[in-house]
Amino acid sequence: MVAVDVYVRSRAKKPSQPCGDSFWYAEEGERLWLTVVDGLGSGLEAAAAAVTAIDEIRLQVATAHEREGLDMESFLERLLRKCDQDLHGMRGAALGLASVHARGGRGWYTGVGNVEFRVIGARAVHFPSVPGIVGAGLRRVRVEAFDYAPGDLLVMHSDGISSRFSLPPRGLDAFHLEAIGEGIVAEHGKSHDDMMLVLAVQHG
Ligand SMILES: [Mn+2]
């Protein structure tokens, strides 16, 4: 059993419309999965694109996690390309997808468009946005590896949050997700776009 704290904060550009940004967090076996998808534009069509991508990710992760020796690099690339096909003819989306093992070791990240991902561990790692639109035909897909240890802070967000925030270094105490998240949203959340911020940390 893995103990993970997850903080999620989202906000629609217009309160009367659905938020076009979505997230998914899951634990499959001992592997943690985190994704943020920003459907282009806002409202119903943006939300539909984001949900379509997340449904595909859920399905593929659920069917793949049982397999021994899953090659994460090629799995993430195939998954991103499948989402690209699924969203063809829809609004398109920016997407970030990360996976780590609860015992630590190498973590994996892939992303396209204005979703950013950071890992705050022994050192801070930042994966900025990569040009492209999921659904518009991806040419190159980059899958990146990073070092992960239990207790490291995982941060993923859409461009409804300015990426200029700083984060506390990993110290002896656990990260306080609520305080960190509320601070980022208050100071760096944008009022003219949908917003999604997800923080996750293992504890215990
Ligand atoms: Mn956006």
Image (cartoon, grey):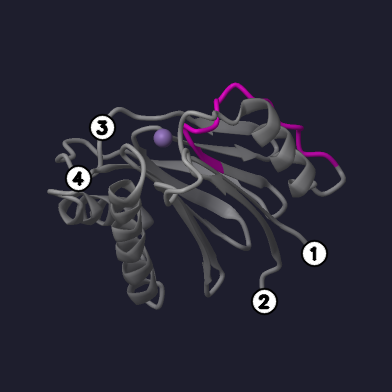
Q: Mark 3: which secondary structure? A: loop
Start-end of magenta stretch = 156-171
Q: Which residue is mark 3?
A: 132
CA gap, disc 2 to disc 4?
Answer: 36 Å
Magenta segment includes 170: yes
CA gap, disc 3 to disc 4?
Answer: 9 Å
Number of on-image labels: 4
Outermost residue, right direction? 172
Q: Which residue is mark 4?
A: 135
CA gap, disc 4 to disc 1?
Answer: 40 Å
- Among the 4 quarters of the image, the one containing residue 191: top right
Query: Position of 49 compared to 3: left or right?
Result: left
Mark nearest the camera among 4 and 1 is 4
Image quarter of the C terminus? bottom right
Q: Position of residue 34 (x, y in %)?
A: 50, 55
Q: Quadrant of ligand 1?
A: top left
Q: Which residue is mark 2?
A: 1
Q: Residue at image x 53%, y 75%?
A: 29
Q: Residue at image x 36%, y 59%?
A: 54
The type of residue carrying mark 3 is Gly
The type of residue carrying mark 4 is Gly
CA gap, disc 2 to disc 3?
Answer: 37 Å
The type of residue carrying mark 2 is Met
CA gap, disc 1 to disc 3?
Answer: 38 Å
Label 1 vs 3, first from the N-terminus: 3
